[in-house]
Amino acid sequence: MKTTINQVHKYVDQTVTLGAWLANKRSSGKIAFLQLRDGSGFIQGVVVKEEVGEEVFQLAKGLTQETSMYVTGVVRKDERSPLGYELNVTGIKVLHESVDFPITPKEHGTEFLMDNRHLWLRSRRQHAVMKIRNEIIRATYEFFNENGFAKVDPPILTGSAPEGTSELFATKYFDEDAYLSQSGQLYMEAAAMALGKVFSFGPTFRAEKSKTRRHLIEFWMIEPEMAFVEFEENLEVQEQYVSYIVQSVLKNCQLELKTLGRDISKLEKITAPFPRISYDDAIKFLHEKGFEDIQWGDDFGAPHETAIAESFEKPVFITHYPVGIKPFYMQPHPERDDVVLCADLIAPEGYGEIIGGSERIHDMKLLEEKLKEHGLDATHAYKWYLELRQYGSVPHSGFGLGLERTVAWISGVEHVRETIPFPRLLNRLYP
Ligand code: 4AD
Ligand code: MG
């Protein structure tokens, strides 16, 4: 029976054939242990000389890393292995011999691994991170579908820039100037007026000259937008959604979390509701903690976010930021003109901001003023956006969750470069 490693539990004590690569091996005079991988998982193949005979045993002993093959054997239950099963090998058919695979089981430097990203992806650790990423994506679609959201795809080539004009990738669109999307939000607002509750999932681009463990030039964002949903209700959707993806990973990626050595007890605590702290109180808190440099009106840096997050076991919402450090589209506070109805969600354990969201301005006149203040063209590039407020305007809210930062946090990996298959970083466009 031809099968895959993640299905061997169905064939205990039966003979199966796996298409596999050799990840690693060790052997003695009488027995060889092959670490086999097939994309679905990893399994140990045990080759016993007495059972298979001299020829197969010598073949097994001589296999080189990443050689591809069909391996036949009997599935055995094995409590000691992470998978719970191993393969008692009876035959091997080599498909392609691999010579000098550069990524050996020893330690390598980051630059070397990044240069070999196309091959590094095969490692057990990278495999685990990609599986967790996939589970978060799967759970995202499940959550939003179950909660009545329709998926809408905003354009990637755009003429308007929601998050400010300094970090745009410009390109020619025939004779016009165009930009790669920084956020689909403005289009999602239009979609919410048509479909009520919508979400998008797509690539976004920021020409940020930041070289930190949280910044990518190209990253993927999940952007829900909801008509008739106000500030506080928006936070409730966010905490439900984030808890849902964490609990889904806990349920469906146990092996991967173990491979990564993730402290699962920390993830088990991630259930709604999440704590909330206002920007005002966050500033007071930081002053008490000895951050004297930061003043009301300043944006938080990574050390500030980490200090705040450290006092909570769950992600924490920082709410009501000063109007001056947030984009033009955010709804002002009903009783204060110096803060807006927004919140950033800060992940625990120093992973930083994973969500930015807000209630949106729905009054046409106010939006027109804000566009003007920000030097944005209400007669051309933003004309259509303004027009959304002209025909039955309603309160509405939404948010954007950065996938890679979320994968980093849930997987417990240090740097976002390991959370996307082919990271685009400052000074890195290959592979
Ligand atoms: O806070 P941001 O800039 O919000 C927006 O773009 C809104 N228009 C979203 C919305 O309301 N629909 O970005 C949202 C999230 C951040 O919280 C962060 O997780 C992630 O996107 N992000 C990045 N991730 C990796 N690399 C970067 N350079 C990122 N910039 C933002
Ligand atoms: Mg933000």
Image (cartoon, rainbow, N blue to C red):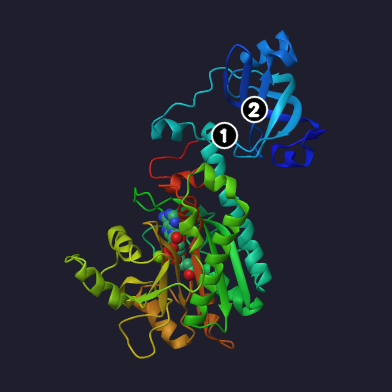
The residue most toward the top is 54
Q: Position of residue 357 (x, y in %)?
A: 46, 71
Q: Residues within 10 Å of mark 1 (few under 14, many from 20)?
A: some
Choose top left, top right, bottom left or bottom right for residue 161. Answer: bottom left
Q: What kind of residue is marked 1?
A: Arg
Residue 48 badge: none
User: In the drawing, what numbered circle is on residue 21?
Assistant: 2
Residue situated furthest bottom in the rendering: 335
Is the Cβ of the residue at disc 1 closer than 8 Å to that at disc 2? yes
Q: Residue at x 64, y 57 (%)?
A: 138
In 3D space, how far apart are the residues under numbered discs 1 and 2 (Cα atoms)?
Answer: 10 Å
What residue is shown at x 46% (from left), y 82% (from top)? 361
Quarter of the image containing the N terminus?
A: top right
* Ligand 1 image position (quadrant): bottom left
Q: Which residue was labeled with disc 1? A: 122
Q: Residues within 10 Å of mark 2 (few under 14, many from 20)?
A: many
Residue 192 is at least partly visible in this image: yes
Look at the numbered disc 2 and give the secondary structure of its residue.
Answer: strand
> In screen coordinates, is 230 left or right of 107?
right
For the question of whether residue 179 can be seen, the reply is: no
Amino acid at pointer 2: Trp
Q: Residue at x 64, y 62 (%)?
A: 141
